[in-house]
């Protein structure tokens, strides 16, 4: 299905229904959060009843974008709404497969009317092409760019809050317009969002420059233990639960973006951030700024992602986990 056809079929399906359920992947990032919020605003401006349900909480730094309640799978208010009558269409955004939405995909059938169509709006190359309406373009830097395309196709004039939501999404998925995925389309999207009322200084400030001091102290401890491999081509950073607790005794730590430092060192092509999730379980985030496809490395451990940014979970002791990751990366370095 080519994109304009898919946009057309989204519009015609939407014309015949009222209640739309929107979701995205677990551990929602800026693209996920901004895209679902914006899509809800866009559909509501067409008079639809659009709601968002997520498996996870929205991270603190993105909460300034929230303009109306977002539900979790067990929220009373949401479940009451579902008993009033099922949703007529489900839209997955920024999810390469339905399972990425966690508990949402497990419960979806209970919340939908029989035979409700599923739309899939995404930019992952690994997207499985699931759903009845497939608005997927693996060349785009963010799912938000596709949501913007959809809004333009539907002839919606964006409000400033929706423009900020989409701007935050494009901003974060392009690493503030610095990652190699930053394309003319990303910058054009940003331009039209600013024209529609997005405020880049505000969005950037709220997402990146309001970290607690403890975050930088934790970063200091992570930096002082970094390891270099393969003549400086690979940097590995690690964070244990104990280390995180030392600086954040009560709250969980937002580690998004730490992995990006691994490829900000002169000479590095690749970076890995190994974060302990629980005893014997590690989440490994990978970055590439050369030709190496880190998605292939993540896939070797059952994970996935993009060529330049990917991730996986590995079980074992920390030294074993690091050794396996370093060895797998070595196989791809050439
Ligand atoms: Mn994305």
Image (spheres, grey):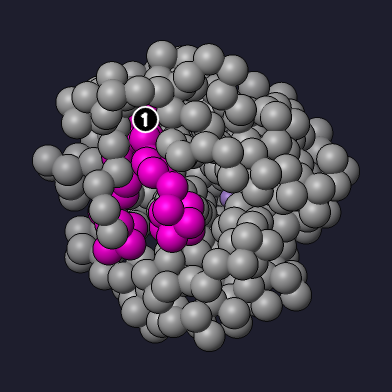
Q: Report whether 248 appears left or right of 126.
A: left
For this orientation, the residue located farthest to the left is 250
**Figure quadrant of the N terminus:** top right
Q: 229 and 26: which one is in front?
A: 26
Between residue 144 and residue 6, name the one nearer to us. Answer: 6
* Residue at 33% from the left image edge and 62% from the top image edge: 65
| Left or right, 101 with reference to 308 | left
Judge whether residue 147 can be spotted in this image: yes
Q: Residue sitting at 40 percent across and 23 percent down?
A: 86
Specify the quadrant of the image occupied by residue 50: top left
Q: Is residue 55 magenta?
A: yes
Q: Position of residue 148 (x, y in %)?
A: 60, 63
Which picture quadrant has residue 55? top left
Residue 177 in magenta stretch: no
* Residue ID for mark 1: 55
Percent x, y of residue 219: 34, 57
Query: Does 81 sit left or right of 44 as displayed?
Result: left
Camera sees residue 238:
no
Indicate the position of residue 257 as horizontal and vertical percent values. 46, 56
- Highlighted magenta segment, given as a residue range: 41-66
Q: Is residue 126 above or below residue 150?
A: above
Q: Residue 256: percent from the left, percent from the top? A: 42, 51
Q: Residues within 10 Å of mark 1 (few under 14, many from 20)?
A: many
- For the point 37% across and 35% down, which residue is it? 53
From the viewer's perspective, tell me whether residue 334 is left or right of residue 229. right
Placement of the C terminus among the 4 image quadrants? top right
């Amino acid at each position: 299905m080519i994109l304009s056809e898919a946009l057309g079929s989204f519009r015609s399906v939407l014309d015949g229904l009222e209640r739309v359920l929107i979701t995205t992947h677990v551990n929602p990032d800026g693209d996920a959060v901004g895209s679902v919020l914006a899509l809800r605003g866009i559909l509501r401006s067409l008079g639809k009843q659009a709601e968002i349900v997520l498996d996870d909480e929205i991270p603190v730094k993105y909460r300034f974008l929230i303009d109306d309640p977002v539900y979790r799978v067990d929220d009373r208010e949401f479940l009451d709404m579902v008993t009033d009558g099922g949703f007529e269409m489900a839209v997955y955004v920024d999810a390469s497969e339905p399972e990425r939405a966690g508990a949402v995909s497990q419960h979806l059938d209970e919340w939908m009317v029989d035979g409700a169509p599923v739309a899939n709006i995404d930019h992952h190359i690994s997207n499985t092409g699931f759903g009845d309406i497939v608005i997927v373009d693996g060349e785009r830097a963010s799912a938000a760019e596709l949501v913007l395309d959809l809004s333009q196709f539907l002839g919606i004039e964006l409000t400033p809050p929706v423009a900020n939501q989409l701007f935050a999404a494009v901003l974060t998925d392009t690493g503030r317009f610095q990652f190699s995925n930053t394309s003319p389309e990303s910058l054009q999207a940003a331009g039209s969002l600013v024209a529609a009322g997005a405020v880049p200084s505000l969005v950037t400030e709220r997402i990146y420059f309001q970290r607690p001091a403890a975050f930088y102290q934790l970063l200091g401890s992570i930096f002082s233990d970094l390891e270099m491999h393969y003549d400086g081509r690979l940097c590995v950073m690690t964070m244990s639960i104990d280390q995180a607790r030392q600086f954040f005794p009560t709250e969980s730590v937002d580690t998004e973006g730490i992995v990006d430092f691994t490829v900000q060192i002169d000479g590095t092509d690749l970076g890995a951030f190994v974060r302990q999730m629980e005893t014997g379980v590690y989440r490994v985030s990978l970055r590439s700024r050369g030709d190496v496809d880190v998605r292939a490395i993540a896939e070797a451990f059952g994970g996935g992602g993009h060529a330049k940014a990917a991730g996986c979970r590995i079980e074992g002791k920390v030294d074993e986990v690091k050794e396996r990751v370093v060895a797998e990366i070595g196989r791809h370095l050439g």
